Amino acid sequence: MHMADALLSPAVGGAMLAVSAGVLGYSIRDVRKNFQEKRIPLMGVAGAFVFAAQMVNFAIPGTGSSGHIGGAVLLAALLGPAPAFIVMAGVLLIQALFFADGGLLAWGCNLFNLGFFGCFLAYPYVFRPIAGKRMSRGRIFAASLLACIVSLELGAFAVTLETLLSGITELPFSLFAAVMLPIHLAIAVGEGIATGAVLIFLRRNLPDAEKLRLEEGTFSVGRLAMVLGLSALVIGGGVSLLASGSPDGLEWSMEKTAGTAELEHSGALHGLVARIAEWFALLPDYALPGVDSRIGTSIAGIAGVGLCVLILGLCGYALRWKKTHRDVLR
C-alpha cells in the first residue's frame, strides 16, 4: 500500500506531510519521556524485521493479487505506539530513499496510512482490549487479526480519499474504494495471522514474556533483539526470494480501476522529487542493476536490514542522549 508520488497533488502530499510530522513530533516527545532506555536497541532490529517482512508478498488466492504486512500493529505490540510510529517513519523513509518503494512526496501519506491507524488506533483500541491482561494464545490471535483488519482497512480507505482530494480522475472514488477495501481485507487477514503467530512465538520463547505485555518490557531485550535481527537477515536475504510476483493490493486495484498501475505525474515539484529519488535510489525496486535478479534481491534485503538497524538504532540512542543531557542540565 505504498503510494507513489503520481497519486498525489502537491497540496495533499504537503498537507499529509505536515500531519504526519506533527504525529511524529508527538511520538518523539513521548519516547523521550516514557521509553525504557534498555529497549532502545529494539527500535533498530524491530524496524529491520518489518522492512524484511514487507519484502515478502504473499499471494491472495483467486485474485491475481498479493500483499505484505504493514507491520504497525506488530511494532506497537513490541515497542508501544509512539516508538512504533517512529520506527515506521524510518522504515518508510529508507524504503522511499534507497529502494524507490513509495514516493518522497507521498511519504507523509504512507506514514499516516500505514503507521498512524495501526499504532494509535488499532493497537490501543482493538488489540489491547481483546488481548486483555493475561494475553492467552487465543486472545493474541483474535486481537492481532481484528487489529490488522481495522488498521489496513482504514489505511486503504485513506488512500482512496487522498487520491480523490488530489483530483486523480483515472481513479474514481466509488470504484476505487470498491476494489481497494475488499482486497486489503484479504491482505489484512494474512497480516493478522502472521502478526499473531510472531507474537505467540515470542511470548512462548522469551523469559518472563508470558507474564506481561511485551511492550511493558520484563522480557530479555537482548534475546528478543537477537531473534528479530537474525530473523530479519534470513527473511530479507533468503525468504524474500519466494515472494509472489503478482501486483500488490494497491497496484491490483489501480489496474482494475484505471487499467494500469502506472500513472504519469506532471509539474515542477513532481519532477524535482523524482530527480532526488533517482539520485538516492541505490537499489531501486530491491534490485542491483546489472546483477542477477535473485542475487540483487538478496543483497537489497540484507542492505535494507543493515540500514534499518543502523539508522533507527542511532535515532533511538540520539533520543536517549538528548533526554540524558537534558536531565543532567536540570
Image (spheres, rainbow, N blue to C red):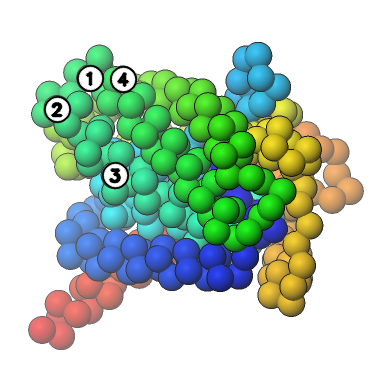
Q: Decide: few, some or many residues near mark 2? Use Cα within 10 Å; few <14, some 14-19, many ≥20.
A: few
Quadrant housing the C terminus: bottom left
Q: Decide: few, some or many residues near mark 3? Use Cα within 10 Å; few <14, some 14-19, many ≥20.
A: some
Q: Is residue 297 visible?
A: no
* Drawn side of residue 124 relative to residue 103, left or right: left
Q: CA distance from mark 3 to mark 4?
A: 18 Å
Residue carrying label 4: 141
Residue carrying label 2: 132
Q: CA distance from mark 1 to mark 2?
A: 7 Å
Which residue is at a point 34% across and 63% down the rendered structure image?
A: 23
Residue carrying label 3: 121
* Drawn side of residue 273 relative to residue 311, left or right: right
Q: Amino acid at mark 1?
A: Arg
Residue 218 in the image, given as x and y percentages of width and height: 16, 39
Secondary element at tag 3: helix
Q: Amino acid at mark 2?
A: Gly
Name which quarter of the figure residue 59 lies in.
Answer: top right
